[in-house]
Structure formats: C-alpha cells, structure tokens
Image: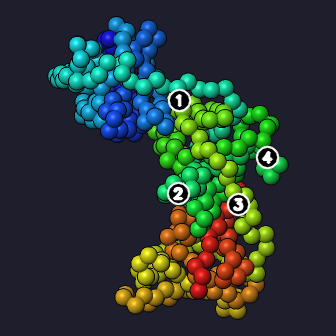
Amino acid sequence: MKLTSTRENLLYSLEIANSFAGRHANLPILQNVLLRAHESGVEISATNLEVSIKTHIRAKVEETGTFTVPARTLTEYVRLLTNDQVELSLEGNELVVRSSGSETKIKGFPADEFPVIPGIEEGHTYLIKAEPFREAIGRVVVSCAKNEIRPEFSGVFCRFNSERYQGLLMAATDSYRLSETRIPLSQGEDVDVTCIIPGRVMNEIARLIQLGRGHEGEENIRLTVSANQVAIRYDTFEMVSRLIEGRYPDYTQIIPTSCKTKGVFSVSEMINKIKAASLFTTVGVNAISFNFDPTKKQIAVASHSTQTGEHVSYIETEVEGDAQSVLLNHRYVLDGLQQIEADEVEIQVTSPDAPCLVRVKDDETFQYIVMPIRQ
C-alpha cells in the first residue's frame, strides 16, 4: 500500500472516524482504523461493533492494499504535521508516514483481523436538509435518559410521515422531561415509519454534520431506515448504526392540550434569572419556584437552601390566566431554554402537579415539557 493525500483531507477523514474507534478488552483492534487503498481512492473505516463509519478520501494511490493502525495515534500525529502533502506506505507491520522534514513508523495489525463493516440494508430512504436536522437533534437529544435501564429512553424516537405530521417528528424523554420537534423532509416515501436511534449516535450525527459544513457544500443528508439499522450518508462519509429495539411509549398523552396560566418571557433574561437562583438550591433537588402573578404582570423566580441562603428575582412580562406557583428542576428548564434560538418563549402551566409546556409563542415545531417537583 502506498498513497499520497493532502494533510487537510486526511485529517478531516481521521477526525470523522476517530471517535468511532472504541475500547474493547477482548478486541484491541477496535482502537484502530482500517485503511483501504484501491484504484479509485482511499477509505478509512472504524467501528465499535454498535456503530460503523466509512469515509472516502481523494488521494493518489500508487499501490493498493489494506492495513489497520491505532486511530488516536495516527490522528494526533497528522494533526501536528505542517506540510500540505502526506505520504502513507506499508512496510511489514508498520505504516510509514512521510511529510516534508519528518518520517514516522506506526505499528499496526493486518486488515483481516478487523471486524467486517456492515453494508447499508435496503429500507426507507429520506433526504433531509443537513443544518435543520443538526439543530433538531440538539433540541431533542438533551432529554434522552443517561442510563439504559429502559433502553428506549436512551434513544430518540423518529417518526416519518405520520397522520400527526407529514415530515420527520423526533422526540426524547427520560420520564422527567420531554422534547419534541418537527422538521420537513426534502424527499421521502409517504409511508408511516418509526424507529428509535441511540442518543449517543444522534450526537455523533450532529457532530459529523458540523464537521462536514463547508467541506463539500452538500445541502441534504440521506437517511435510510431498515428493520434493524439506520444509515446516514453525507459529504464524504457513510455511517451505520443499530437501532434500539422495543416500543416507544405513547408520550403524546402527557402533552398538555390546555392550560390555566400563560407567561411570555425573554429567553436570555430567564436563563440569567435561573442561573442566579440555582446558586441557592439544595444539591440533588435543584428546585426553583416559578410564581406567576397576572395582576402584577410578573414572574418571580425564587429558591432557598438551608446551606447557602435564599434568592428571588422578577421578570416584568405578560402573564395571562390564574395566579400560580410551580416547582421545577432548574437543570431541566435550562436544558430546554438553551436549545431555543428565538428571543421570546411561552410557558404554559395548568397546576402545580401537571406538566409544564415551554415553546416559542405561536410555533408548534418544538415543544419542551417539564414534570414539576411535587411540593
């Protein structure tokens, strides 16, 4: 194997693949990337057995061949190079990396020891604008459960072209809060299809879209859903992941359909007030009181702790309906607000024990629901 590539193209593909090279006590080769040089170009692949990635590099190939080397070592070394041209060649069980003024040898393993990278199965394929999809992932993935006691809660529920919404509907919940967002499809079959994509995979998709912005200038990603896997094609890479098995609960039952109190506030101002109040909450409870006063046209944000003291601040704003007080976990509220790009947001409250709904006023494309702390 012998090839020459630009440092920029090589590093870009290595950074894409690097995070998929996983640690595995019984399979140390999973820490490696697979280099495959053939007549038409070069592929770099990595897998952790749950998720696989394959990227394509434009390169001059003088000799075809395959080999695997530690992903982190090769990525960090190429990042330190300053010359634009990088030559890779195979000598025995070592990959030789040459650039102007430097040469290094990295030990690796034969390619036949590397796990087989699964191909993309036939399924339902959709085109989605890349940047709105990345933003939508950020809005929902914060609500995924951090553990896998209930595996389906650690993923993002995706539903394509349902009766409820002709497009892509995405939702996530950890049973304490719920995010739901909607984005249109550029192209896709008019069939009601559902799947649960692991939250960590969604984070990687968002990261890869961010990396790919401006690289090839593609507007859409291609997403294929089959019975057992989801595949993403974008820019120079394609990624395949297993889906989470199981049935996602009917979360629509907890979405409030009416409310007794509405408050409108500036997102940036409310974030500031919540951060101040969070300094005076009991560790582990994170409780902040939101008091709605339609007479005074204000929302009071209050907290107290036996260790640190107490705090209250006010937002002068539009409040409609009944005077109410609700106790919420400030971390959950902040997680939702920090995903909203609008200037103003509406919060809807029914009672101290009922779910609270946060959304951009007169906009149903994103809903964030927080369960209250029982007083």
Label 4 to label 3, Cα distance in Å? 15 Å
Across and down, in percent, residue 351 comes to 70, 82
Q: Tell me the residue at 59%/41% (across/down).
A: 243
Label 2 to label 1, Cα distance in Å? 30 Å
**Residue for badge 2:** 149
Q: Nearer the viewer, mark 3 or mark 1?
A: 3
Left or right of residue 14: residue 317? right
Label 3 to label 1, Cα distance in Å? 31 Å
Q: Secondary structure at mark 3?
A: helix
Q: Is residue 216 visible?
A: no
**Of the image marks 2 and 1, the number of the one nearer the N terminus:** 2
Q: Nearer the viewer, mark 2 or mark 1?
A: 2
Q: Residue 162 bears which disc, if any?
A: 4
Across and down, in percent, residue 139 comes to 58, 56
**Of the image marks 4 and 3, the number of the one nearer the N terminus:** 4
Type of the residue with mark 3: Tyr
Density class for disc 4 (Cα within 10 Å; few <14, some 14-19, many ≥20) is some
Q: Is residue 300 visible?
A: yes
Q: Nearer the viewer, residue 131 or 163?
A: 163
Q: Nearer the viewer, residue 362 or 194?
A: 194
**Residue for badge 1:** 238
Label 1 to label 4, Cα distance in Å? 27 Å
Type of the residue with mark 2: Ile
Label 3 to label 2, Cα distance in Å? 18 Å
